[in-house]
Amino acid sequence: MTPTDVWNPQRPSGMPYHRYRPHHERVRVPVSERRWPAARVDRAPLWVPVDLRDGNQALAEPIDPARKRRFFDLLVRVGYKEIEVGYPSASRTDFDFVRHLASADAGLPDDVTPVVFTAARPDLIERTFQSIEGLPRAVVHLYVATSPVWREVVLGRDRDGVRRIVREAAELMARRAGDTPSVRFQFSPETFNLTEPDFVLELCDELTEFWDASPDRPVTHNLPATVEIATPNVYADQIEYIHRNLARRESVILSVHPHNDRGTGVACAELAVLAGAQRVEGCLFGNGERTGNVDLVTLALNLYAQGVDPMVDFSDIDAVRETAEDCNRLPVHPRHPYAGDLVYTAFSGTHQDAISKGLAHHARTARESGMPEGRAPWSVPYLPIDPADVGRSYEAVIRVNSQSGKGGVAYLLRTHAGLDLPARMRPDFSRVVQEATDDSGGEATPKELEELFRATYLADGGIRPAAWSVHTDPSGAHRFVCTLDTGDRTADLEGTGSGPLTAFADALTGAGYAVEVLEVTDHPVPEGTAAYAECRVDGMTTWGAGIEASALAARVQAIVSAVSRATARH
């Protein structure tokens, strides 16, 4: 027994894990001195959405031409400058869409470059070049699977055989492009992360030289994690090896294309950028084959949350999400980072309390510094970015159910009903809410919370001052005179005290209520004044509330509310 067995009671699963090989047995990564762990990202890479090609081919219902155009326009509005628009040799729809972009009335922006995808077959390459005729600029993206298992099982070729396929395709692409500077080339050694790094380097360097890449007409070498097989640090090691050993490095755009089979696509992309990648391909919200491509939205907003300009605009995240959902016919999960319906929402009481205090502190510090809240530095617990920055309101940040606490309940009453409960009153109402949500098993909306508050503290409790007045004696003492209706009897009462409320409490002794006023606070509301009173009634401490046209009337009603609630409990 090892020391860990003492605290770890896990036992063998019985699953046939022995069928699978660890990554280091499948591909050897030459690692010397790693530089990426100490690197920092201070600028965004070139983001390249592949929704219209890679994302589209993963859909049960491929995107039709009208939705393709709508999606393309969205990508342009967000700020993407290089967009993979299709696989024109694979479908008539994709071919026609590329031809549409090449037409005079397509309105292709001057700073947006379409990318077209092709396999290394002469007929497909020819069809691809036919599709881009008339485009002012384009990138032709060639892919060939290069890893041992693909070479042996799918292609039936050795390394030299794959090299010949790549060279022949590259020659045809060069002939078709001619000397046109508006057409650039991209190469993807598909299944890069399972391919021997030295072989990838050979292929990439040969193409860089053959296509005569230069800084003003660079080649893009795109290194896909076609199927994730290892932790993200391994992918970073692979990218850094290529980055540090590429020939004519200044003439190469080093790109990555992570998938999400292990659920680490975002981490792979981020570490790859630390390791030297300059360009990242992915899809909005992670659509794509199997578990999807890396999510470009999460990547961009992760940078944003670190104070780095993402160079794309997600200030209306819901509009982006709605368009993607409609075009893909796939929903975005409510817990999806930054964009899901629930990602800025807290149900937990401790979380709500921290967020409520954080928002109040943010507003106060912004005000004190003379800065608008939307421009002030952001530091609010549990909210990595300000929801308003992506077009969300604070309305759904705190929601109440049986797990919620006093802070969240108070926040919603204050922001939605204008009722700012004193700190000592909040646990009292929170218990009422807890009972209600336990009984319903569901969530309490802000409107339902306000209705519950009014039913608890403002409803007729059976004790009503039918008429009352306050008089001040020459000595400064206050005299409270009232007619009190308790349901079964009416009594004329009078009491004195140092103030109107202590005089009212004294008057209530005539009706048999021993009342001590412990705390009273109030604030303006549209109806006049809301007041809250903590009283000790016949030895029981309880809270009441009142809303009236005048502050004194609201305070009197709050004491009446407290007495009524205490009486009902006896």
Image: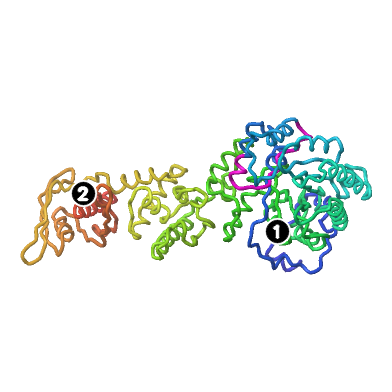
> For the residue labelled by badge 2, is the local secondary structure a helix, a strand or a loop?
loop
The numbered disc on residue 129 is: none
Determine whether 432 is above or below 124 in the image.
Answer: below
Residue type, numbered disc 1: Val
Q: Which residue is mark 2?
A: 549
Q: Quadrant of the N terminus?
A: bottom right
Decide: marks 1, 2 in contact (CB < 8 A)? Answer: no
Q: Residues within 10 Å of mark 2 (few under 14, many from 20)?
A: some
Which x, y percent locates residue 534? Answer: 27, 58
Which x, y percent locates residue 436? Answer: 40, 45
Which x, y percent locates residue 274? Answer: 70, 61
- Which residue extends farthest front? 179
Q: Write down the region rendered in magenta.
A: 73-91
Q: Residues within 10 Å of mark 1 (few under 14, many from 20)?
A: many
- In this picture the colour scheme is rainbow
Give the label, 1 or 2, closer to the camera. 1
Q: Which residue is mark 1?
A: 273
The one nearer the camera, 130 or 224, is: 130
> For the residue labelled by badge 1, is the local secondary structure a helix, a strand or a loop?
helix
Q: Residue at x 89, y 42 (%)?
A: 155
Residue 301 visible, this orientation:
yes
Determine whether 501 is above or below 76 in the image.
Answer: below
Residue 566 visible, this orientation:
no
